[in-house]
Amino acid sequence: MIIEPRTRGFICTTAHPVGCAENVKNQIAYIKSKGTVVGPKKVLVIGASTGFGLASRITSAFGSNAATIGVFFEKPPAVGKTASSGWYNTAAFETEAHKKNLYAKSINGDAFSNEIKQETIALIKQDLGQIDLVIYSLASPVRTHPENGVRYKSTLKPIGDSYTNKTVDFHTGEVKEITIEPGTEEDIENTVTVMGGDDWQLWINALMKADLLSENFKTLAYSYIGPKLTEAVYRKGTIGRAKDDLEKMAFTITDALKDINGKAYVSVNKALVTQSSSAIPVIPLYISLLYKVMKAEGLQEGCIEQIHRLFNERLYLDGIPTDKEGRIRIDDWEMKASVQEQVAELWQQATTETLPEIGDLEGYTTEFFNLFGFKVDTVDYTKEANEMTAIPSIA
C-alpha cells in the first residue's frame, strides 16, 4: 500500500516500514563506524522500540556485540493498516542483528504487568542465563498497577500556580501563549506512580529473585532536567516529581544489589524530539531554538550519538563520573552556559514571524516525522510498502 503520514496533535497515526528501517540502519551504521567498544554482553531493554531505548539496544548490539532482549508495547500491523513505528523499528533492528548472528528477541506487551515480567524472566532463563545490563526506558502516559489493578494516568502540569509562556504548533509554525493550570495532589501522585521509580524497582527485584543478574550488574534509567526556561512545566512540575522519584530509586536499587556488586544509575540526557517531548507544552519551541544553537556550535546530537557517548565516555569507564546527586550527566553540551544564554536570548525574540529565521523549526518537524518513518531522504514514498512487515522473533 502507499503509506502517507496522518497526524493527530502530537502523534502520527501511521508509520512507514521502509522509512523506519532506514532510520534504524542509519543508527546502526553510526555505531559500526565507531568500532567495537567495551560494553555489555547480555542486555534487557525495557522500552526498547523507540528513542533512547532503541538507541541503547542498537549501541549494545552493534557496539559491543551484545545479546539483547527488548520489551515494548507496540501496535502490530493489520491488512491495510500500519503498525506503530516502534514495531517497524524493532523488525528492522532484529533483521540487521540476525544478519550479524547477534542474539535478538523481543516481547510485545504491557511492561508494567506481572505477566510480561514473568514472560521475560522465562526467556532470559531459557536463552541467556544471566544479564549484565538492564535499560529502563519506559515513557508510557498510563499504567495499570499490577498489585491493585488501578489504572493511573500521568499529567504534564505545573505545581502551585498556573503557568503561562510561549509554545509553538510545530505543524503550522504558529507561536502563541499557552496557560497551563496547576496539577492537584492527585495529579502529582498519579504521575509519580506512572513515571517514577516503582516499576523500575519491581523489574529489578523480580530479576534478582530469579537469580538472573550477573556479578557487577548495572541498570540504567533515563531522566531530564533542562534549563530554568522550562522548569515550571517540566522539572518543577508533575513530571519533575516523577523524575525525582526515579532518581531516588537508583540509590534504593543499588542498596539491594550489594551482594553482586551491582549499581543503579540515572542518566540525565539532552532534550530531543521524541513522541514524549512533543506532547509537552513549551518544549517544542525550546528544542527548535536549542537545535539552531547547538548545530551552529557543532554540538548537536541525536539519540544514537547521545547513547554512544553515554556508553563509551561514562557508563563503561572504570570510574563513572556523576554529579553530586549521583546522576550521570550526558546533557552537558545542552547545559553549557554559552548555549543556554543564546537560547534564552532567542526565546525573547521568538514569534511566528521570526522563528523560521532564529530557530530550527524545519529540523524539529523533520525529526518528528522521522520518528514515524516519514521525510527520510533515501525513501521513495510514491512506492508501495508492505505494511505487514513482521518482527522475526514474534509469532
Image (cartoon, helix red, strand yellow):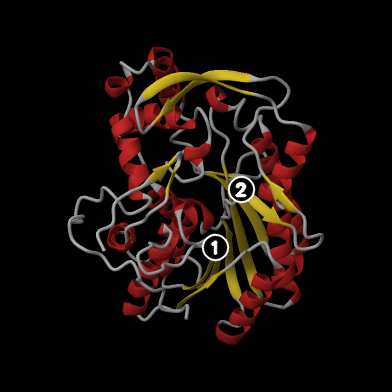
Where residue 27 sits: x, y (%)?
33, 58
Residue under the image location 69 percent in, 66 percent down: 113
Q: Which residue does the numbered mark 2 point to in the structure image? A: 141
Query: Up-down: is 206 above or below 148?
Result: below
Q: Is residue 37 visible?
A: no
Q: Which residue does the numbered mark 1 point to in the structure image? A: 73
The amino acid at mark 2 is Pro
Decide which of 218, 384 is in the foreground and name it.
384
- Find the distance from the CA under tag 1 to the CA under tag 2: 12 Å
Q: Is residue 110 left or right of residue 351?
A: right
For the N terminus, the image quarter is bottom left
Which of disc 2 and disc 1 is earlier in sequence? 1
Dividing the picture into quarters, in which one does residue 182 lie? top right
Query: Up-down: is 98 above or below 364?
Result: below
Decide which of 1, 233 is in the foreground and name it.
1
The amino acid at mark 1 is Phe
